[in-house]
Image (tube, helix red, strand yellow):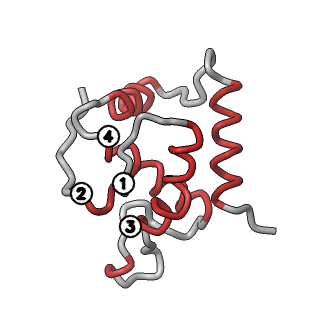
Amino acid sequence: MSTTPAAILDVALQKAEASIVQPIVTNPSIAEKIDYVSRYVGNRAVVRLLLACSLAAIHRGNVDIRKPYTEIGTPDAYSGRYYDESYITAFINKHELPCNPTTAFLMPCETVTSP
């Protein structure tokens, strides 16, 4: 039985809330990069992009998170915009998350350098 993207987001939120004191990501380097991107106020679209790509990778294990455009034409490509508009928008609005109100896949990406 397949889990829906909305259910995946709900479980992820529950796990995040339950581990607010004890981080889920234990690798300090990765945790630092996640923290940097999630708190970077210069471009909030990056958070939406990561949420949509991560959701697609969890929902469909065969996708390559680096290929969020069906125009790429490979079996492991997917529509990041679909995941963003179909699931991330509702999730962001429901939980009042500080993200862009529109899809990340319409905005030009700004290069975000890690600390």
Task: Select label 1 or label 3 by which is in front.
Answer: 1
Q: CA distance from mark 1 to mark 2?
A: 9 Å
Q: Which mark is residue 21?
A: none
Q: Which mark is residue 102?
A: 1
Kind of residue indicated by mark 3: Pro
Can you identify the residue that label 3 sits on?
68
C-beta proximity under 8 Å, tags 2 and 4: no
Mark sitting earlier along the chain (1/4)? 4
Q: CA distance from mark 3 to mark 4?
A: 18 Å
Q: Position of residue 87 (x, y in %)?
A: 55, 58
How many neighbours does mark 4 have within 10 angstroms: few (below 14), some (14-19), or many (20 or more)?
some
Q: Which mark is residue 44?
A: 4
Q: Is residue 71 above or below residue 11?
A: below
Kind of residue indicated by mark 1: Thr
Q: Which mark is residue 107?
A: 2
Instruction: Find numbered disc 4 in the image and state the secondary structure of the residue it sits on.
Output: loop
